[in-house]
Image (cartoon, rainbow, N blue to C red):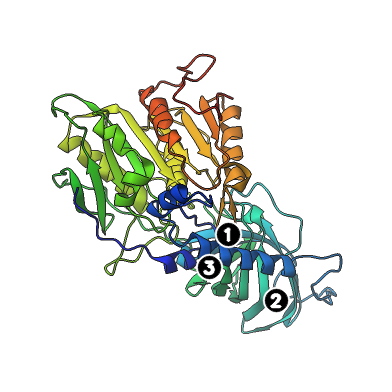
Amino acid sequence: MKSISHTLRAAALILVAASVFATGCTDDDDSNDAGSDAGGDAAQDSANDVGNDGDAAEDSSGDTDTDPWPTCDTAASSDALIATGRYFMAIEIAAMNGIQVFFAVDVVGGSDSILSIEMYGISPDQTVTDTELIARVCDITVANGEFEISIDTLTVPGVATPIGTPVRLDNFVLNGTINDDGTFCGDVTGALPLLSIDLAGSAFKAVADGDQSSPPESSCEGTVVETWDFIADCPTFVEGTNTFTSANLEREILVDLPEGWDGETEVPLLFVFHGLGGNAEEMVAYSGYDTVAAAGNAIVIYAHGADDSVGEQVHPTEWNYLLPRYGNDNPDVVYFRDVLKCAAEAWMIDEDRIYLSGMSAGGLFSTFLTLTQSDVVAAAAPFSGGFGLAFPETYDNLTPILVSWGGETDTAVSTNFDDLAEALLTQYAAEGRFHVACDHGAGHTWPGAMTAAAWDFLSRFEYGDTTNPFGSELPEVFPDYCTIP
C-alpha cells in the first residue's frame, strides 16, 4: 500500500483541549509499547506529564474547608444596571471548534457596578447544575454598559465538560456588555494550561435562567453554525491511499481490499479510526484488521483525521465528537458520509454490513457515529471509547456494540475511560440494546487478542439485527474477560 505522508506530532498532544485523548497504552510490556506508538501515542508520556501537572494545579486551586472567594457587599440597589437573579451563560471556545460550556451565574446588580457574580457548572445536556461554587467576583465596574470580569484561576468542574474531566482555566476574562434586554455578552480570553490552549477568539452570552434558546446562543451575534454540502461527484477510489475534498478540507483514506475478492460479490465495509496524533497507515498494523482484508472478509477503510495545508491537525480533538452536531454541520460526519457514498460507487458494498471500530479518540468517534448515524451502522467495536454528549432520544437502529477497554488504569490525558465505558454500558443496558463488554484490564491499549474477537462480533450482524447471536456464552475466539452482561 502507498504510504500516507504524515508525521507524528508530539507537540499536537500538548495543544489539544482536556477532552482530547491519545491512542496508546501505558503498559510496560515492550510489544505493547510498540503497538501503542504505532497507534499514534508516541508522545503519551509527555502528555500524561502535562495532565499530572494540571491535576495538581486543580487540586491546589480547588475548594477547601475555607471559602477561597472574597465576600461581596450585596446591599440591594433600586436602580441597578442589571437585574439581580440567576442567569444561564454559554461560552463557546474557538480553539475547540466552538464547543460550548454552560454555567449558572448568580448576579447582584448595583447602581454603577455589578456587586457580585457567582458561577456554577452546568452539564452539557443542561440537566444538572453543580452546587459547588467555582468563582465569586465582587465590585465589577460598569462604564457605558461595558465591564470586565477577571478570574485568575477558574476550574470548570467535570460535570460541565463533555467527557467529565475538570478543566483549569488561567487568566480567565469576560469582556462584556449589558444589553437593553437585560442579557449580557462579549468576548472571552485566557488560557487552558493543561494543554496550552489560548482562549482568544472565544465568546459568551448570558440570559435570564429559563430564557436560553435551543441550542443556547453563546455570542453577541448568536450562534452561527457552518454547514457543508455532501459530496456530489465522487472520485474513483482505489486500493491504497486516496485523497479527495470533503467539507472544503483535503482528506485521505487508506483502503485495503479483500484478498482474492472477485469484485463482483457484495462484501462488508469496516471503518477504522485512529487516535490522537496517529494516522490511517499506522492503524493497519496497530489494529490488526489487515487480517480481516487478508482473509477476504471485508473492505477495510482506515480513516484519516483532517490536516491543514502544512500538515497540522485541523480539529484539536482529532475527530469531531464533542459537539452535538450530527449532520452537515459536522465536517467529520460529512467526511464519513462522503466516504461511504463514494466507496459504494467504487465497489460492491454490502450496505447492510457497515461496521465501525477505532481506538481512543477513534474509539470515541466510532461510538459517536454508532449512536448518531444509526441509519447506516450495523454494528460497532470501539476500543477505549465512550460518548460525552446527551444520548439520542431515538435511533433508526439499535446498533449492537462490543465495548472494549482497559479497566481502572485506562486513562489518558487525565481522562478516565473506565468511567466512559461504564456509562456507555449502563446506557445500553437501560435501552435494552445488545452489547458485549470486554474489560481487558491492560490500561489504555488494544490487546492483540481482541481483534479477532471484534471481527467475530461485527460480522455476525446485518443492519437491523439487534438480538443476541451467541446464546448463553461467547465462542472461544473471545478472551475470558469478555462477557454478555
Which mark is nearer the camera, 3 or 1?
Answer: 3
Task: Indicate the position of residue 419 as horizontal and vertical percent values.
Answer: 62, 44
Which secondary structure lies at badge 1? Answer: strand
Q: CA distance from mark 1 to mark 2?
A: 26 Å
State the mark number for residue 101: 1
Give the residue at x 45% y 57%.
Answer: 317
Residue 204 image-quadrant placement: bottom right
Residue 280 or residue 266, whichever sits in front: 280
Which secondary structure lies at badge 3? Answer: helix
Q: CA distance from mark 3 to mark 1?
A: 17 Å
Residue 114 image-quadrant placement: bottom right
- For badge 1, the amino acid type reads Val
Q: Closer to the N terminus: mark 3 or mark 1?
A: 1
- For badge 2, the amino acid type reads Leu
- For badge 3, the amino acid type reads Leu
Which mark is nearer the camera, 1 or 2?
Answer: 1
Mark 2 Cα shell of 10 Å, populated few (<14), some (14-19), many (≥20): some
Give the residue at x 32% y 36%.
Answer: 270
Q: CA distance from mark 2 to mark 3?
A: 38 Å
19 w.r.t. 57: above or below = above
Q: Closer to the N terminus: mark 1 or mark 2?
A: 2
Q: Assess whether mark 3 and mark 2 are in contact (beta carbons under 8 angstroms).
A: no
Residue position marked by numbered label 2 in the rendering: 81
Residue 295 or residue 382, whichever sits in front: 295
Residue position marked by numbered label 3 in the rendering: 195
